[in-house]
Amino acid sequence: MLDYALLSAISAVVREGSFERAARALNVTPSAVSQRVKQLEERLGAVLIVRGQPCIATETGRLLCSHVEQVGMLEQDLQGALPKLTQANAGNGRVTLRIAVNADSLGTWFIDAMAKFLGAEAVLLDVALDDQEHTVEWLRSGEVLAAVTAHAQPVQGCNSISLGRVNYVAVASPAFMERHFPEGVTAASLGEAPSLTFNRKDRLQSQWVRRVCRREVDIPTHWFPSTQAFIDASVAGIGWGMNPATLVKEHLRTGSLVELVPGRTLSVPLYWQHTRLQVPMLSRLTRAVIAAANQASLQGTRVGH
């Protein structure tokens, strides 16, 4: 039989990043948290927490944290059906639900999903930010229960729902175009003109260049790990970059940004993958995500489970 007092200590340390902050969250001493973690590690014969700044879970620890999160959601749903149980546990903290999302979704439509969901749920969200090609790894490792991802193939034990596609456009300021592409956008000019890249995992610019030039081109780049900064840097003439069409629509209308090659967009599919466990709260989050995607015109359908 699992000891949930011990499991809660593991979960708190991973969520908060340190034994001290976990102790404050649980309203106990750091020594008590340390003892609970050590006791569970001794029982299981495995290291569950890698001590450091921050503390992180081992693979076994992540599995236990995922279990605690799922149990917490089920308990919270049960409290909604049994008010007396809620009163008896009035001092308990709210459940924290971990999900992974790509930056452009978070900067466009996903906030609406979170707002709709949180408007009816007494729950906290812990959002991990990563490239849409890599958010699935968070789900595969058990660090999150759901993710917005570019991968259609369901992770083992998960459902996959198509959310539709996001169209990206390659844009730059008119002055940048005059300076770097006076004779048009070619492999040679793209090899000289500074581009904008979100982080080392972002391949959108390279993918677009390969489609336009039909070959690989080594493009120089600035690094801007912010969706809004990406647009601001494009408008300021710092470089050219791939931006969601919805975010630069007004800039294109007013002329503060122009397309490098008109009509040559890059379409990226998005999927919502979540654990297949029958957890009502997670089902409600899924409905909120689908509704927000539909509202943003990312029309999609269920593709696997």
Image: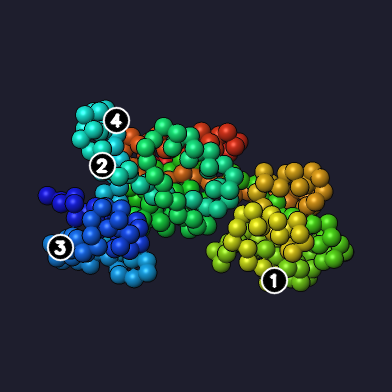
Is there CB contact under 8 Å for labels 4 and 3?
Answer: no
Q: CA distance from mark 4 to mark 3?
A: 33 Å
| Dot 1 amino acid type | Pro
Is there CB contact under 8 Å for labels 2 and 3?
Answer: no
* Closer to the camera in the image, 154 or 197: 197
Give the mark nearer the N terminus: 4 vs 3.
3
Give the mark nearer the N terminus: 2 vs 1.
2
Tag 2's secondary structure? Answer: loop
The residue under the point 39% across, 35% down is 121
Asked whether the viewer can see residue 124, the reply is yes
* Closer to the camera in the image, 268 or 173: 173
Residue pointed to by mark 4: 80
| Dot 2 amino acid type | Gly
Tag 3's secondary structure? Answer: helix
Give the mark nearer the N terminus: 1 vs 3.
3
| Horizontal and vertical percent position of residue 68 | 26, 49
The residue under the point 30% across, 45% down is 93
Give the mark nearer the N terminus: 2 vs 4.
4
Residue 39's label in the rendered image is: 3
